[in-house]
């Protein structure tokens, strides 16, 4: 039998016939082939289709992987937001330096400088306009042997506020906001991918469910066929013993029993494989005992009623297919990339401003007249004096200006923008291709539903006629007007017709499942797995604005 051999349209006619024709051995409690084949089992699990789907959504590991991917993308959004997190920094240290006597004022031994210092600050990128600001506070205590110094030790303190604002490049969109937009859109794509994976998983579960149900029905068909062959062999033995037919007829009947016994063994194997295929989709990985539970699919077969409206299904698919929607988000991402790279081609013009208040204290040397003047006294000024000067505008330092930078010639941003525009064209064409594929897939799936529905009706009629022929042949055989060969052939024809009915029933059920699924998501190809994709978030450090000063000015 072919792989997609079974489905839910097992037809009440066959099942009623199977139940009504059970052999006497089964009725008296004699061991059956199924009992011998499966051995001792635990209590079976009666499983509805809805329960199977629910178990798959709760337990399927591949679906759980995709579900977790949405959480990963949520974490990526949080990563991009860290670009706006205030950054606190502090430095505490000590340094010592001995300066060589480069001039006569420093004496013969040079100058010793011993310095204690600390600096604390906060900086942050603003979530709008891409501006950055910083606040810093620094203090120091410096002791020196320099004869020209006015303080020893020297206590210094300073407070600085600075701001940098881009006016062209980075103002509309910068790296941080670009990454946030992409990450936020990718989260939506992950949610669509999860929904798509649910559709594919549900379709796979339904296919496996109906395959198992049809496989179990096929076992029943093979058992009934085997019993018919055994019954014919018993009748032939009686007739051979009575001398009414030649022994070759008994040999032929027993050979047919052996062949059908082999078919039954194969049917059991197919049924067990189908059961494990369903288990794989719905089993809880932590429940090892579930592999030993016999699954009994109890869902009733679908009834062939109104056939699908293919054109309406195509229109629906083009509106709601998850893969087309995800491709649309990819197109939005490429457009955002183009806007970002186009902005990066602009000149980098920035407004830079800063203000700093300084304070000075310590032990001040009072000198007499002349140069450098002899020390005639000292005056002590505490650290509080330095703090007061910081906020009293005694020693202010400020800056205000513009910086401009622009690459000369073909820049990296120019090349990147050209590439992004090509990628946008590729994405547009991919969406067009997806829409064509979706329409073709849905139309083909709709035709499959229609054709399999007609096949089921034809197969049902064939099975009914094959049963009538077997009944007639057995009546003729009973009165000596037929042969073992003709009865055996009629039994084979009935078996073939019943298996064909199972096959067409499965095909119809599979077509229904597929038609429902492809309107929302593309089918998952055999052997393929659910793919994941994600974009790494690059750390965007917050710069520290320091104001704008003339090089070499000594500030």
Image (spheres, rainbow, N blue to C red):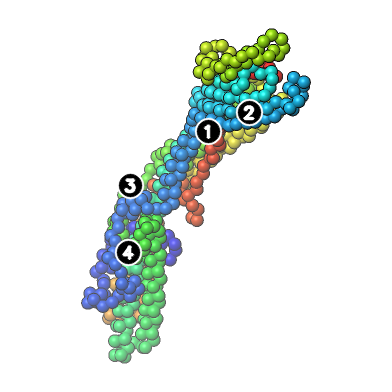
Residue at 40%, 47% (x, y): give it. 198
The label shown at residue 533 is none
Asked if residue 261 lies left or right of residue 340, the reply is left
Q: Who is closer to the viewer here, 530 or 163? A: 163
Pointer 2 local density, CA inside 10 Å: few below 14, some 14–19, many at least 20:
some
User: Is there CB contact under 8 Å for labels 2 and 1?
Assistant: no
The tag earlier along the polypeptide, 3 or 1, is 1
Q: Position of residue 304 (x, y in %)?
A: 32, 52
Position of the C terminus, as image quadrant, is top right
User: Disc 2 designates what residue?
Assistant: 114
Which residue is at a point 36% across and 62% down the rendered structure image? 288
Residue 182's x, y, as percent?
51, 34
Label 1 near label 3: C-beta < 8 Å?
no
Q: For numbered disc 2, what is the local secondary structure?
A: strand
Circles 2 and 4: CB distance less than 8 Å?
no
Label 1, on which residue?
Answer: 179
Q: Secondary structure at mark 1?
A: helix
Q: Report x, y in % for residue 134.
A: 54, 23
Residue highlighted by disc 4:
293
Disc 3 is placed on an element classified as: loop
Q: Which residue is pictured at 49% across the width and 29% down the height?
A: 86
User: Is 274 in front, or is 10?
Assistant: 274
Q: CA distance from mark 3 to mark 2?
A: 95 Å
The spot of residue 434 in percent (x, y) is 51, 41
Dot 3 or dot 4: first in sequence order is 4
Cα gap from disc 2 to disc 1, whole angstroms: 47 Å
Q: Which residue is mark 3?
A: 306
Is residue 289 depicted above or below 376 in this figure?
Answer: below
Mark pair 4, 1: CA separation: 50 Å
């Amino acid at each position: 039998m072919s792989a997609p051999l079974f489905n839910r349209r097992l037809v009440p006619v066959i099942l009623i016939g199977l139940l009504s024709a059970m052999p006497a051995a089964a009725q008296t409690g004699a061991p059956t082939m199924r009992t011998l084949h499966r051995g001792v089992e635990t209590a079976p699990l009666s499983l509805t289709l809805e329960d199977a789907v629910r178990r798959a959504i709760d337990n399927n590991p591949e679906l759980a992987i995709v579900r977790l991917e949405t959480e990963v993308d949520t974490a990526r959004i949080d990563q991009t937001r860290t670009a706006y997190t205030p950054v606190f920094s502090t430095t505490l240290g000590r340094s010592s330096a001995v300066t060589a006597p480069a001039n006569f004022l420093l004496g013969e031994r040079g100058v010793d400088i011993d310095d204690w210092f600390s600096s604390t600050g906060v900086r942050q990128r603003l979530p709008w306009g891409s501006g950055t600001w910083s606040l810093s506070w620094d203090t120091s205590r410096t002791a020196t042997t320099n004869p020209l110094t006015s303080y020893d030790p020297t206590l210094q303190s300073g407070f600085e506020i600075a701001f940098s604002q881009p006016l062209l490049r980075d103002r509309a969109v910068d790296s941080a906001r670009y990454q946030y937009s992409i990450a936020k859109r990718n989260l939506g794509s992950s949610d669509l991918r999860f929904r798509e994976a649910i559709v594919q998983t549900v379709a796979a579960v339904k296919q496996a469910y109906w395959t198992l149900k049809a496989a179990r029905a096929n076992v029943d068909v093979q058992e009934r066929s085997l019993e018919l062959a055994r019954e014919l062999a018993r009748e032939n033995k009686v007739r051979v013993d009575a001398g009414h037919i030649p022994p070759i007829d008994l040999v032929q009947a027993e050979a047919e029993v052996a062949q059908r016994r082999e078919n039954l063994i194969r049917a059991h194997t197919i049924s067990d494989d189908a059961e494990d295929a369903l288990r794989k989709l719905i089993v809880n990985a932590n429940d090892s005992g579930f592999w030993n539970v016999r699954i009994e699919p109890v869902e009733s077969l679908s009834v062939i009623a109104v056939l699908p409206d293919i054109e309406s299904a195509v229109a629906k698919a083009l509106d709601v297919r998850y893969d087309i929607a995800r491709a649309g988000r990819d197109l939005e991402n490429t457009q955002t990339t183009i806007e970002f790279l186009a902005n990066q081609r602009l000149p980098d013009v920035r407004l830079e401003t800063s203000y700093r208040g300084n304070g000075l204290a310590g032990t001040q040397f009072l000198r007499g007249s002349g140069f450098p003047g002899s020390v005639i006294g000292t005056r002590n000024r505490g650290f509080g004096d330095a703090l007061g000067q910081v906020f009293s505008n005694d020693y202010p330092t400020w800056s205000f200006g513009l910086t401009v930078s622009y690459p000369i010639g073909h820049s990296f941003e120019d090349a990147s923008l050209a590439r992004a525009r090509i990628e946008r064209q590729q994405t547009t064409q991919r969406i067009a291709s997806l829409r064509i594929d979706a329409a073709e897939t849905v139309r083909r799936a709709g035709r499959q539903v229609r054709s399999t529905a007609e096949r089921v009706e034809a197969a049902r009629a064939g099975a009914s006629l094959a049963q009538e022929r077997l009944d007639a042949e057995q009546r003729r055989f009973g009165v000596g007007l037929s042969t073992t060969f003709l009865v055996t052939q009629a039994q084979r024809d009935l078996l073939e017709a019943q298996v064909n009915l199972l096959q067409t029933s499965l095909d119809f059920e599979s077509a229904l499942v597929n038609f429902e699924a492809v309107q929302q998501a593309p089918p998952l190809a055999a052997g393929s797995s659910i793919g994941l994709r994600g974009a790494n978030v690059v750390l965007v450090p917050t710069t520290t604005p320091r104001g704008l000063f003339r090089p070499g000015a000594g500030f």
